[in-house]
Image: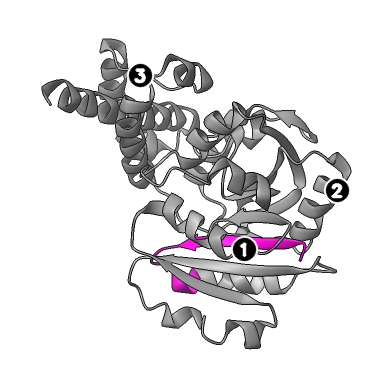
């Protein structure tokens, strides 16, 4: 078998169903299977997983992980995989009809088992136009595809497990992902795997759409959690050099407070540029707030 598609999922049966339907619509695909790991106790009846192999005409294996974060669910799916390569997708990622063929063809052309192939992800057209999502894509708060050189080796800090592939035996040798992390599993994996020779190739032809509604509040909560995780990770100076993160300070707090004052006026007037300035300072501040809170707890404990 050429490819095992690993999909960790939690609380989104209807979105997962559409994700599987896009995989079933692959054009001239390689020999592949899908391994879904449900993270938690949700029934997922709406996804029709018990009938997916028959109705979608693709092999689907379903396993469970006891609600211990995305990394643990991905590792559990990996245990069931049989393909020469694994493609890791988010449950809200809708594959282009040529996605699997593109991943496999790039690996075959590169011929290096230590190279991971990073595919491209863009917001689904059903979610657009949306000024905030369009701004987020330009800024790369979640995925910085605009900063990568296309069809070339890129920094490991750009490895995103929303749409990435690598050899299964290589991933198993590396030990999979750190199941103790509530966030940053891909960033930490790339940092550690880089010590063993992992390299990352960006192929925008391995394309998929991201179908999930993100708001400033939601991104702010995720950034807060990442800041908390970073408080521990950034104690390693080598890891601190691997990533670029906003740091706490009086100017950070001042800009955040100013953005909170300006944002309602900018929103009412439709001032896109000023809104973008407000949004970036909001998400950076939430990261530093999480970082500072966690550091205080660490110092007190």
The answer, for residue 126, to whether it is visible in the render is no
Dividing the image into 4 quarters, which one contains the C terminus?
top left
Circle nearer the N terminus (3, 2): 2
At numbered mark 3, what does the secondary structure look like: helix, strand or loop?
A: loop
| 212 lies left or right of 300 | right
Residue lying at 66% horizontally and 52% vertically, measured from the top left: 168
Residue lying at 57% horizontally and 65% vertically, measured from the top left: 80
Residue lying at 20% horizontally and 28% vertically, measured from the top left: 293
Q: CA distance from mark 3 to mark 2?
A: 38 Å
Q: CA distance from mark 1 to mark 2?
A: 19 Å
Local crowd at mark 3 within 10 Å, few (<14), some, or many (≥20)?
Answer: few
Residue behind mark 3: 235
- The picture places residue 193, in percent across and down from the top left corner, at 58, 33
**Magenta stretch contains residue 129:** no
Circle nearer the N terminus (1, 3): 1
Observer-nearest of 289 and 83: 83
Residue behind mark 1: 81
Circle nearer the N terminus (1, 2): 1
Q: Magenta span covers which residues?
A: 1-15
Q: Identify whether 97 is placed above or below 238.
A: below
Image coloring type: one colour
- The picture places residue 183, in percent across and down from the top left corner, at 40, 42
User: Looking at the image, which residue sits at the far front?
Assistant: 173
**Contact flag, marks 1 and 2 (Cβ < 8 Å):** no
User: Looking at the image, which residue sits at the far top?
Assistant: 250
- The picture places residue 218, in percent across and down from the top left corner, at 35, 47
Q: Quadrant of residue 46?
A: bottom left
At numbered mark 2, what does the secondary structure look like: helix, strand or loop?
A: helix
- The picture places residue 281, in percent across and down from the top left corner, at 37, 26
């Amino acid at each position: 078998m050429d490819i095992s598609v690993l999909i960790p999922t939690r609380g989104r049966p209807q979105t997962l169903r559409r994700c599987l339907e896009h995989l079933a619509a692959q054009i001239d695909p390689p020999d592949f299977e899908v391994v879904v790991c449900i993270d938690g106790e949700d029934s997922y009846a709406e996804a029709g997983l018990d009938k997916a192999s028959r109705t979608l005409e693709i092999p689907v294996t379903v396993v469970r992980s006891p609600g211990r974060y995305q990394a643990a669910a991905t590792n559990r799916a990996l245990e069931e995989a049989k393909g020469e390569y694994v493609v890791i997708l988010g449950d809200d990622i809708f594959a282009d009809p040529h996605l699997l063929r593109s991943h496999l063809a790039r690996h075959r052309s590169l011929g290096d088992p230590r190279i991971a192939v990073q595919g491209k992800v863009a917001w689904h057209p059903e979610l657009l136009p949306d000024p905030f999502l369009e701004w987020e894509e330009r800024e790369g708060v979640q995925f910085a595809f605009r900063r990568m050189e296309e069809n070339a080796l890129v920094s490991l800090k750009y490895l995103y497990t929303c749409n990435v592939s690598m050899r299964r035996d290589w991933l198993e040798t590396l030990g999979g992902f750190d199941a103790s992390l509530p966030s940053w599993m891909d960033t930490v994996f790339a940092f550690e795997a880089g010590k063993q020779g992992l390299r990352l190739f960006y192929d925008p032809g391995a394309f998929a759409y991201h179908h999930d509604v993100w708001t400033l509040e939601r991104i702010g909560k995720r950034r807060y959690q990442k800041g908390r995780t970073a408080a521990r990770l950034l104690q390693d100076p080598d890891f601190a050099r691997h990533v670029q993160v906003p740091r706490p300070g009086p100017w950070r707090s001042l800009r955040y407070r100013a953005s909170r004052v300006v944002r309602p006026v900018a929103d009412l007037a439709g001032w896109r540029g000023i809104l973008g300035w407000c949004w970036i300072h909001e998400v950076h501040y939430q990261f530093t707030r999480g970082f500072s809170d966690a550091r205080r707890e660490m110092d007190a404990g």
